[in-house]
Amino acid sequence: MRVAIIGAGMTGASAAHQLRQSGAEVVVFDKARGPGGRMTSKRVESLDAALPFYPLDFGAQYFTARHPLFVKALQGWLAQGVVQRWEFDPYVWQHGLLLPSHDGQSRYVSTPTMHQLVKTILGDTPLHLNCRITELSFSQSSFSSKHGGEWTLSSAEGASYPGFDAVVLTCPPAQCRQLLAEHPLALQIAPELLLPCWAVSLQLQSAVEHPADGIFVKEGPLSWCARQSAKPGRTGITEQWLLHFNAKTSLQLLEATPEELVALAQLEFSTIVGQKVEVSQSLCHRWLYASFNPAQPAPGLLTDKTQQLILAGDWSLGGRVENAYLAGQQAAAILLP
Ligand SMILES: Cc1cc2nc3c(=O)[nH]c(=O)nc-3n(C[C@H](O)[C@H](O)[C@H](O)COP(=O)(O)OP(=O)(O)OC[C@H]3O[C@@H](n4cnc5c(N)ncnc54)[C@H](O)[C@@H]3O)c2cc1C
């Protein structure tokens, strides 16, 4: 079986790995410059001349593991050294107070960046990067396919990739809908399954004196603040904080300028840590589709068995890295005999 996977995030990597282990031929396509999807890292300028740039996690900050299948995979990654436990006690900012909030939760990061885990899972899977798929067409007249039809993918660059027996689409739902055009599965995708998030990195002139390394923000425009140097395996990173705006504010500020966002982030963060922070460098990244909308039910994987077309993503099972991995495993299980 020859399978095209659109999206080199955790779902795509998980599906690719499982399918290849069972002997399928897999090709992965992604519009981005590298694999990782929402676990990606961006190159940030450093103040250290010896290390002019370093990668910083702008999307997923860590992951948790509950499902036995994911826990088993995690044990393998820990043994390989691609994942480490991030031991920190979170703080919570609420009612104008920053207080420790020990929750007993184990949190994990991939090292040296979050996207390294996706890269590792993909291994040597054939991967087309910088390749935005713009059209999917299914032809029933093919004699070459064992499944009564054949998929052809077309890219924005004008390339055509024919000869696939199955397609696994792992883009965020809105992008799946766009790609599916008139296909009946498009109608099954609920709107607003994923909410936006502005991520802002702040390189500070001096260290935050408060001992908090990760803060869940329950009031105001932010939702999360993390000292990036506190994560395991992040060498060379100095006093660099990554802040996420909450979904409501991100939606309101969707078109805000970096200057506006940084000013607001700096003000809020100074209030939270109780110290006026001075920013030497900053970078903003807008995620149009970031985290699962808790007001929506998780739709599960959407499948067209006749055409061997599967829509899977973290959103299928309720968001987060763990569910992306599980969705990839489920997609592979549907296709494998
Ligand atoms: C700001 C933020 C914070 C988060 N924090 C956490 C956290 O702390 N813990 C946690 O567990 N999870 C967190 N998440 C969620 C986590 O990152 C996701 O659940 C997970 O990475 C989703 O993986 P995925 O493969 O399903 O989707 P994605 O990672 O979105 O992968 C989809 C891929 O499809 C590609 N693509 C889209 N359209 C096309 C096209 N037309 N052609 C080719 N390629 C295409 C994209 O480039 C992308 O690489 C966070 C996410 C964000 C954005």
Image (cartoon, grey):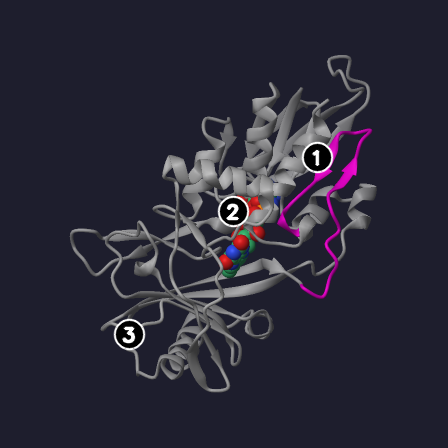
Label 2 beta carbon within 8 A of ligand 1? yes
Q: Please tell me which residue is depicted at 61% across the width and 48% down the height of the picture.
A: 323
Name the residue carrying label 1: 136
As helix, strand or loop, the secondary structure at mark 3 comes to: loop
Give the mark nearer the N terminus: 3 vs 2.
2
Name the residue carrying label 2: 37
Q: In the image, residue 16 lies at what x, y percent? A: 57, 31
What residue range appears in magenta? 294-315
Please count the marks in the image. Answer: 3
From where the camera sits, is residue 34 visible? no
* Residue situated in front as seen by the camera: 114 or 323: 323
* Residue situated in front as seen by the camera: 157 or 45: 45
Secondary structure mostly seen in the magenta stretch: loop
Label 1 or label 2, whichever lies nearer to me, is: 2
Q: Please tell me which residue is depicted at 76% across the width and 44% down the height of the picture.
A: 181
Question: Which mark identifies residue 208?
Answer: 3
Compute the Cα span from label 1 to label 2.
20 Å
Work out which residue is located at the far bottom of the displayed protein and give it.
96
Disc 2 residue crowd, few under 14, some 14–19, many 20+, Cα 10 Å: many
Q: Relative to 109, does residue 258 appear above or below in the rendering? A: below
Work out which residue is located at the far top of the displayed protein and give it.
143
Which amino acid, mark 2?
Answer: Gly
